[in-house]
Image: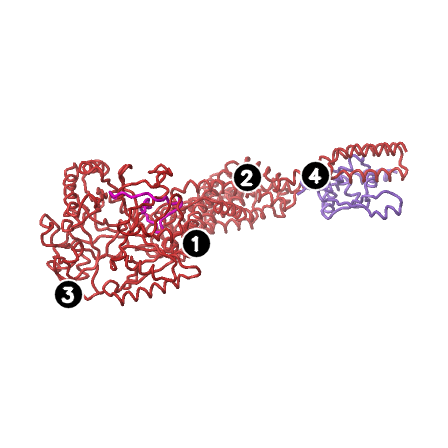
């Protein structure tokens, strides 16, 4: 059905989904978490949304007015996105082990 | 502030690249985000970097929206189609085989469906066909439909309240046309004025008949068919009002029938091209000469039952009012379409069942092949699965592949069916000529192809895309799961069972046809030529006809190679008969109980020419001329039926055909004839009929003999004779054409054409089924052997002999074949009961047929299993083991 599902989910893609899973909800929050550039993260969000891994909505006009700021557009994971993320996390667990080892080593040498 | 302006500008400009549908959201979101970024006190460099991202996002969003639009454009995943095509290119042999079997399976179904649709399903091509009925006479004693007389017809037509209108027609015979046109004999028939009106026909050109024309003395008119108009009259509108000579009398062309008009009584030999009027004299209608049949249109809201009851009441009253003409005569009313197609229904449904079975075998075979292929494809699919393809996506991809195969096979099948139209549209099956490949056929083809794709593809697809694909990668693949092996064995059993049923059905029909052909028709068919000619009454008066024929016989007799020349008014097996009443002079019967037999008028040498042997007494000779004592030759069955245990030679019968009314006596008088000879019986209408009592009168003692069939026996091949005979006839009269030129063998074959068609088609399907079943066994065996190569290698390394291994594998593989044969045998037993009415002299459970086809199928399956087994057993075990 979707391109992402057939091809590999990229590392960056997995990061963006993970950011949403952690509760970061709008564009620049997600970029802060992932450290991706806006020119990379935004197209990714749009693609995920098209592929129904992610859905988004504007926050209420009133909330924005009360806080005296423009409306935010919030993103969240869909069920499909959550599934794919869990597959990706499993696949990237090797990478995590690399990081874990890297983090663990300096500690032991200290 | 400056950065804020620049950011707004950047968002505005970048937004221009974004498709309009997405632009507002894009801009608002970016402005909002940049606002938050600034408000949260991000560093200037971060704000700039993030702002620059707006352009990248714009380009990406633009591409994304476009791609999404494109993808929505193609309903079926374009990607699936591409993948499918790629997989076909990778396996050309497999693809070719699948397409070929699908083409055969679906094509056969389309062809037979179009036949069934044309004959059984489609309404007749007349206005409001449901209201049409066929009206025939009914011989109450035998319950057989017969003809009605002109007297009965007009009585019914004028008095009926239930029928809105009626029209009558006679036999479809031949007319001689002359005039501006080449002299020619064309099929034609005479009808009453109400005939076309009753059928609701509208002329393509001009008009149809009027009541005023349908009387003696009115100007002669003719209505021509569209085909005649096109081929003989050049399709010009100027033909209306022109005159052609029909049977030497000028007829004005008043109208042209529509192109799709067909006579309501399909004739296996010919379709009339010309229609003239019966022109009965209403003041003096013959009440007892039954030679016409009628069609009737029921009044609005009236039922066939009502019509039947009404006409039966009329017939009973006629019997009371005029017992001499009407005793024992009833009326037979049936739905017109039913009357036309009823005789062919069972045969067609059998063929329909047969092609259905062939398609099921094709499906089983393909399912089997796919399961087998699946083992090889598992690895490729497992990789796709590991890359994130879900089970649904894999199943869909396989179904798309199957659907494409099925649709392609279906399209080729449609082409094949259209190509086979000529073979199917035989005159032997009524209405088959109406076969038409229209939207219904196309819809059927599409539906059937889709259904086929699902039937043969779903189970393998599901099995293939099952959960344990991941294990395939780990194990290295190559071994079929046991569930799949079971599925394949079941499929083999089903294939064998269906094939056996088809083979039995085909075997029974073929044997029945053989029995039919082995029937002695009562005459010798080798090297006998038959042809008809007709002398127009306008030019050959009564007394001149017989001398003309006699001179013609003499001329033909002098041709090289001719051994005997004879003539008859009705040739055996020519779809024509003449059942006439007579009196036995020694014991006259009362009115209504007179004996009847088939009457034939023949020339002296007819018996020698056609080869009917004389049993006792003498045949006709020079003595039997006009004016001499009248004589008659009877058939063996006539002698046995009317003179059981007696000698009929020298007995007399009274038969008044051709004798003027004023000279007739019921018994005795000039109509009385002495029985001088007894000949053996012949088949008149069908080869499967019982013996029919028949008597023959000598031609010279007939005053009028306007149409005649010549029978010429020669010592040379018959082909070379035709031109010689035509030359002799032309030398006598240039304007008389010969027609229906056929060898007696062709006449004989023509009489079994429907049976032959059924046997041929079913035989063909059975052969296809046998081939497919053998192929199925071969494929499954080949694969199971390939999968077990290692096991075989180990067994042989441990000392098993080739014979042991082969025995083990064959015994295993023949299991499903054996239960398939058993199940098929039971199925065939029930199927053959349905065939009973189509069989001649063959019992439905004919043991010879059952035994022989079982043996054929079993042997074929065994051979198919042995080939791959023997190949595997020859493999060097060391190599196999090392190869792993």
Chain letter, purple in picture: A
Q: Badge 3 local density, few (<14 within 10 Å), some, or many (20+)?
A: few
- B629 relative position to B695: left or right: left
- Mark 2 highlights which residue? B881
Q: In the image shown, does B390 or B303 lie closer to the viewer?
A: B303
Write down the chain letter for disc 2.
B
Viewer-side label of 1, 4: 1
Residue B6 is left or right of residue B608, and the answer is right
Q: Do the numbered discs 4 and 2 sit on residues whose CB atoms are within 8 Å? A: no
Q: Which residue is mark 1?
A: B128
Chain B rendered in what hue? Answer: red
Q: Specify start and end residues of the magenta stretch as a single range.
A: B247-275
**The N terminus of chain B - image quarter:** top right
Identify the residue under disc 3: B587
Pointers 3 and 4 within a single chain:
no
What residue is rendered at 47% in x and 47% in y?
B359
Quarter of the image with the C terminus of chain B in it:
top right
Picture quadrant of residue B144: bottom left
Extreme residue toward the bottom, this view: B320
Q: Are marks 1 and 3 on the same chain?
A: yes
Nearest the viewer among B627 and B78 is B627
Q: Spatial distance from mark 2 to mark 1, Cα to Cα?
A: 77 Å
Mark nearest the camera among 1 and 3 is 1
Distance from the alpha carbon under mark 3 to that under mark 4 = 105 Å
The residue mark sitting in front, 2 or 3, is: 3
Q: Chain of mark 4?
A: A
State the CA–CA distance, disc 4 to disc 2: 38 Å
Q: Residues within 10 Å of mark 1 (few under 14, many from 20)?
A: few
């Amino acid at each position: 059905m979707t391109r992402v599902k057939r091809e590999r989910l990229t590392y960056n893609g997995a990061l963006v989904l993970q950011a949403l899973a952690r509760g970061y909800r709008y564009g620049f929050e997600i970029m802060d978490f992932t450290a991706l550039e806006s020119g990379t993260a935004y197209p990714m969000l749009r693609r995920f949304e098209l592929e129904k891994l992610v859905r988004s909505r504007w926050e209420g006009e009133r909330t924005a007015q009360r806080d005296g700021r423009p409306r935010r557009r919030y993103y969240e994971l869909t069920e499909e996105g959550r599934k794919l993320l869990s597959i990706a996390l499993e696949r990237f667990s090797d990478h995590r082990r690399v990081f874990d080892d890297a983090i663990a080593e300096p500690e032991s040498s200290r | 502030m400056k950065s804020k302006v620049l950011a707004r500008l950047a968002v505005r400009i970048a937004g221009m690249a974004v498709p309009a549908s997405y632009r507002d959201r894009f801009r608002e979101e970016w402005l909002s985000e940049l606002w938050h970024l600034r408000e949260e006190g991000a560093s200037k460099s971060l704000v700039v970097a993030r702002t620059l991202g707006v352009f990248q996002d714009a380009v990406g969003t633009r591409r994304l929206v476009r791609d999404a639009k494109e993808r929505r454009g193609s309903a079926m995943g374009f990607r699936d189609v591409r993948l499918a095509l790629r997989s076909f290119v990778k396996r050309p042999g497999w693809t070719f085989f699948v397409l070929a079997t699908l083409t055969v399976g679906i094509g056969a179904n389309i062809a037979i469906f179009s036949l069934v649709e044309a004959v059984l399903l489609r309404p007749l091509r007349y206005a409001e066909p449901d209201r049409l009925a066929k009206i025939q006479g009914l011989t109450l004693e035998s319950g057989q439909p017969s003809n009605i007389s002109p007297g009965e017809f007009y009585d019914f037509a004028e008095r009926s309240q239930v029928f809105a209108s009626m029209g009558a027609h006679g036999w479809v015979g031949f007319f001689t046309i002359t005039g501006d046109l080449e002299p020619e004999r064309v099929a034609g028939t005479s009808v009453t004025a109400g005939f076309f009106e009753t059928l609701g026909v509208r002329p393509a050109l001009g008009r149809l008949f009027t009541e005023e024309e349908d009387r003696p003395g009115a100007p002669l008119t003719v209505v021509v068919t569209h085909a005649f108009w096109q081929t003989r009259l050049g399709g010009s509108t100027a033909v209306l009002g022109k005159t052609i000579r029909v049977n030497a009398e000028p007829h004005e062309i008043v109208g042209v029938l529509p192109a799709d008009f067909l006579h309501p009584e399909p004739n296996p030999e010919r379709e009339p091209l010309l229609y003239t009027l019966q022109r009965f004299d209403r003041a003096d209608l013959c009440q007892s000469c039954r030679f016409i049949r009628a069609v009737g249109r029921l009044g609005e809201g009236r039922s066939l039952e009502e019509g039947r009851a009404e006409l039966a009441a009329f017939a009973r009253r006629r019997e009371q009012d005029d017992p001499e003409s009407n005793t024992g005569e009833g009326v037979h009313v049936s739905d017109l379409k039913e009357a036309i197609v009823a005789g062919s229904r069972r045969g067609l449904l059998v063929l329909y069942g047969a092609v259905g079975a062939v398609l099921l075998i094709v499906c089983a075979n393909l399912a089997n092949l796919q399961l087998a292929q699946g083992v090889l494809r598992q690895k490729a699919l497992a990789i796709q699965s590991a890359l994130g393809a879900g089970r649904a996506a894999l199943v869909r991809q396989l179904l798309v592949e199957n659907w494409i195969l099925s649709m392609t096979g279906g399209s080729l099948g449609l082409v094949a069916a259209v190509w086979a139209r000529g073979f199917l549209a035989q005159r032997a099956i009524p209405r088959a000529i109406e076969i038409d490949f229209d939207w219904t056929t196309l819809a059927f083809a599409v539906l059937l192809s889709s259904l086929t794709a699902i039937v043969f593809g779903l189970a393998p697809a599901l099995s293939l895309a099952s959960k344990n694909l991941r294990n395939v990668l780990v194990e290295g693949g190559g071994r079929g799961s046991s569930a799949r092996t079971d599925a394949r064995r079941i499929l083999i059993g089903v294939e064998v069972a269906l094939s056996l049923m088809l083979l039995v059905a085909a075997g029974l029909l073929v044997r029945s046809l053989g029995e039919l052909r082995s029937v002695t028709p009562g005459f010798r068919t080798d090297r006998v030529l038959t042809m008809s000619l007709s002398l127009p009454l306008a030019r050959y008066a009564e007394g001149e006809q017989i001398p003309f024929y006699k001179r013609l016989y003499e001329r033909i007799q002098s041709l090289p190679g001719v051994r005997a020349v004879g003539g008859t008014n009705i040739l055996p097996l020519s779809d024509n008969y003449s059942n006439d009443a007579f009196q036995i002079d020694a014991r006259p019967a009362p009115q209504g109980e007179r004996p009847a037999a088939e009457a034939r008028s023949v020339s002296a040498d007819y018996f020698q020419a056609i080869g009917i042997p004389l049993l006792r007494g003498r045949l006709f000779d020079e003595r039997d001329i006009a004016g001499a004592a009248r004589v008659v030759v009877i058939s063996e069955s006539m002698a046995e039926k009317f003179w059981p245990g007696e000698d009929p030679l020298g007995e007399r019968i009274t038969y008044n055909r051709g004798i003027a009314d004023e000279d007739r006596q019921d018994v005795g008088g000039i109509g009385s004839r002495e029985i001088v000879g007894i000949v053996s019986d012949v088949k008149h209408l069908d080869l499967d009929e019982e013996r029919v009592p028949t008597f023959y009168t000598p031609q010279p003692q007939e005053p009028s003999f306007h149409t005649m069939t010549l029978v010429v026996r020669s010592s040379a091949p018959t082909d070379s004779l035709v031109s010689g005979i035509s030359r002799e006839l032309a030398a006598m009269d240039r304007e008389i054409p010969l027609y229906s030129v056929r060898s007696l063998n062709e006449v004989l074959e023509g009489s079994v054409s429907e049976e032959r068609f059924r046997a041929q088609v079913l035989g063909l399907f059975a052969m296809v089924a046998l081939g497919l079943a053998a192929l199925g066994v071969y494929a499954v065996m080949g694969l199971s052997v390939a999968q077990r190569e290692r096991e075989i290698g180990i067994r042989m390394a441990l000392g098993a002999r080739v014979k042991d291994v082969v025995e083990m594998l064959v015994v295993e593989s023949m299991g499903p074949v054996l239960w398939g044969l058993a199940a098929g045998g039971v199925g065939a037993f029930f199927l053959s009961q349905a065939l009973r009415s189509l069989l001649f002299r063959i019992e439905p459970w004919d043991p010879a047929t059952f035994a022989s086809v079982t043996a054929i199928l079993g042997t074929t399956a065994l051979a198919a299993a042995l080939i791959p087994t023997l190949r595997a057993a020859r493999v060097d075990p060391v190599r196999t083991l090392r190869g792993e």
